Amino acid sequence: MIYTPEPDDVRIRERNMIKPIEGIGKARERRMAQPDPVQERKISVKADSLEKAYDIYDSEYQKTIGLFFGGKSKRRFAAVTDMTFEIRSGEVIGVLGINGSGKSTLMKLIAGSDTPTKGDITVDGEVALLAATVGMDNMLTGIENIEYKCLLLGYSKHKIEQIKKHVIDFADVGVFINQPLNAYSSGMRARLGFAISISVDPDVLIIDEALSVGDATFSHKCITKFKAMKKSGKTIFYVSHSVANMSEFCDRIMWINAGRLMMLDKPRIVLRSYKEFIKEINELDSYHRKELVQRWEKSRMYV
């Protein structure tokens, strides 16, 4: 039996749902009546009643017994619940939500690194998840890490030599390219890893906070690269807490809270509701904020 959220939770959630907009002018009505070119593109990612739940164990002993001898735990946690949506090729989708809302789980389902508990997720083409610092070795130099990570991505030595100069130029870490990774700052490390990852050519690209790894110049360079990918028909999911970047870069924003898809619409519409939601959360004192989070967690537990 699934626990339902408390009234306060429902009040905040319903308050931030899309409401009908009255008084639309004739000019806007004409724009709305025109065919949307985005809708004429092929569907790139489609989710139908998508759900993902994880077994919750009270101890390591119970977890070990469950892993080796089968059987389900007494409780399950719904990380993603009843999500249905369609994303078309060439769209840039922002993925927004507070920590623990289910963003990472949804991205894993899209990337194919995890499987749904219920429902379906269909992706047309290859998917790449840009995890900037994954697949890098602290003891190797920047040059060696380029070769190492590209090999992990399945590139041939010939292909690596072709893209190496581009990666070095894009990362822009200067003389540190010949130094071991443990001499890098966290920002330099992320920039190098991201520069390597951006060299892939997928149909669907998942970016997790990539624009926060450097200064304004590097962020601008990233956005320029992403816009070129979008123009070539790539579908991009951009997971971030940066409202400014989403407003500038995204066609639509997907707001997720407590494992559910709250809104999927134009940035100005979603961001307006999301900001109101965050304002309400921030106005709560620490006790009531913790209580609200516990209600959300309880609403996602079932047996």
Image (cartoon, rainbow, N blue to C red):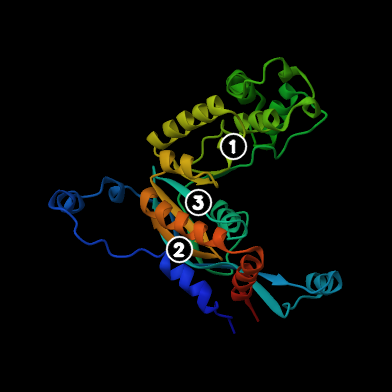
**Residue 296 located left or right of residue 20:** right
Q: Secondary structure at mark 1?
A: helix
For residue 186, above or below residue 99: above
Q: Secondary structure at mark 3?
A: strand
Q: Nearer the viewer, residue 213 or 145?
A: 213
> Residue, x 50% and y 51% (percent of image)?
95
| Residue 212, numbered label | 1
Q: If the image is split into quadrants, where does the C terminus sit? A: bottom right
Q: Quadrant of residue 15?
A: bottom left
Q: Residues within 10 Å of mark 3 (few under 14, many from 20)?
A: many
Q: Nearer the viewer, residue 24 or 250?
A: 24
Q: Position of residue 133 (x, y in %)?
A: 69, 37
**Residue 54 located left or right of residue 244:** right
Q: Amino acid at mark 1?
A: Ser
Whole-angstrom CA distance, mark 2 to mark 3, is 11 Å
**Residue 219 located left or right of residue 137:** left
Q: Position of residue 127 (x, y in %)?
A: 53, 46
> Residue, x 26% and y 61% (percent of image)?
21
Disc 1 versus disc 3: nearer the observer: 1
- The residue pinned by badge 3 equals 95
Whole-angstrom CA distance, mark 1 to mark 3, is 15 Å
| Residue 262, numbered label | 2
Q: Amino acid at mark 2?
A: Met
For residue 17, above or below residue 90: below
